[in-house]
Image (spheres, helix red, strand yellow):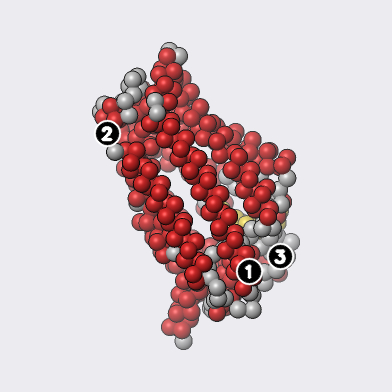
Amino acid sequence: MVLSAYVLIQLFKYLLDWLNIRYMQAHGGSVPPDFEGVVDPAFLKKSQDYLIDQTKLGTAESAFMSLAIIIFFFDSLFDHYNSWVAGLNLSFLASGWTFFILLSLAEQVLAIPFNLFNVFKLERRYGFSTTTLRLWLFDLFKEFVISFLILSFLTCAGLWLISHSPGYWWLWFWAVIFLLSMVITYVSPYVIEPLFNKFTPLEDESLRQQIIDLTAKAGISARQVLKMDASKRTRHSNAYFTGLGKAKRIVLFDTLLQGTSHGEILAVLAHEIGHWKRRHLLKSLLVFQAASLAGLYLLFRVTQTKLLASLFRITADTFFSRVTVAIFLGGMLVFLLHPIMMAFTRHMEKEADRLSFELTHGTSDLISALVKLSKDNLSNPYPHPLYVAFNYSHPPVLERIQALRRAEKKRG
């Protein structure tokens, strides 16, 4: 029954991909009104080809990983792996660390060929990837070290809490996750992000002053306005706020600064300011922490029973095997809840768009910026509504533009 449910979910994901492509092909023959003069039918064709190639690669990776998961969980390999770790006769903490670290390493290794193809074949074919193999390998190594350290800390902390507080470890572990997320959010701009990119003060003094004035108008104090050398890896463009409290910084991709007017950049940043003004970071954090607490408590309850071991015919009924099975089953449940989570984030994006409109006293710059970003990133202007429900954290670009037009018309 579990295998059937997992296969059905994967097939449904592939169905969503197919519907998305068919919907784009059916509606993508004409240039949207707001895109006229900026893109042409050739661009729409290139956008369609990019989506199709991305979908093919994503499907291939998903099918490969799904097959690996099916073999691992349903063909006794998981039982053998669990029994092997248990047979090492290590301490509870050392056994758990070994169990989860090796699984994480295996997952990362399996994903490497697809990442390589995406970066050096697909993204380069469409003019996005600018990275070198040396830089890619260096990034991969740094990502591995960071994830290894974080996972090792969480694993050891969790196992220690389970040993010392078997009835309430879920609550204490939730507190550890919460504190770690706060620490990472605070130190990331100064410790982690500089490991991958170079951040320098924005050289355009006129633009910098306009940004400072905009943030002051919104009642936000940003310590720095920085330019990030994104172009050494990709031609995709973006801008974002980072940090907490007085450590907030504004970061602009150097690719965004190329061919984008000051007004358009300010409109994009006004959108990001909207997230701060509407306390979206806090709301997202509260929702995430509430979901984490509920998930950990549910994990605590299900790992108290022998149901998981019997469901997957596990010979050595270890705590680690029960946790792994519970996480696997939880992943399927999370997918079913995806439309709710995506609807929540899309609602926040709409609010941020509205505040951008209020701060900049108009929609033309934000609409122009959305069109340019869509063009520069070869975004699909015609996604299928069901695909959007499950996968889009932002409203589709045409929907965002129409909402801005309505807001402007309403204001008169």
Residue 43 - label: 1
Distance from disc 2 to disc 1, alpha carbons, whole Å, reads: 53 Å
Nearest the eye: 372 or 67: 67
The first of marks 1 and 3 along the sequence is 1
Q: Secondary structure at mark 3?
A: loop
From this viewpoint, which residue is outermost toward the bottom?
412
Looking at the picture, how far across and down is residue 321, in whole percent? 37, 27
Nearest the eye: 109 or 201: 109
Residue 57 vs 364, above or below: the answer is above
Left or right: 303 as drawn, with respect to 37: left
Tell me the amino acid under the disc marked 2: Arg
Question: Do the residues bearing badges 1 and 3 touch, measured as CB atoms within 8 Å?
Answer: no
The first of marks 3 and 2 along the sequence is 3
Residue 34 vs 111, above or below: the answer is below
Q: Residue at x 46, y 37 (%)?
A: 67
Instruction: Give the residue pinned by disc 3.
Output: 258
The first of marks 2 and 1 along the sequence is 1
Left or right: 168 as drawn, with respect to 207: left
Disc 2 crowd rating (10 Å Cα; few below 14, some 14-19, many 20+) is few
Tell me the amino acid under the disc marked 1: Phe
Residue 266 - label: none
Residue 301 - label: 2
Tell me the amino acid under the disc marked 3: Gln
Q: Nearer the viewer, mark 2 or mark 1?
A: 1
Q: Residue at x 55, y 58 (%)?
A: 52
Residue 185 can be seen, yes or no: no
Q: Secondary structure at mark 1?
A: helix
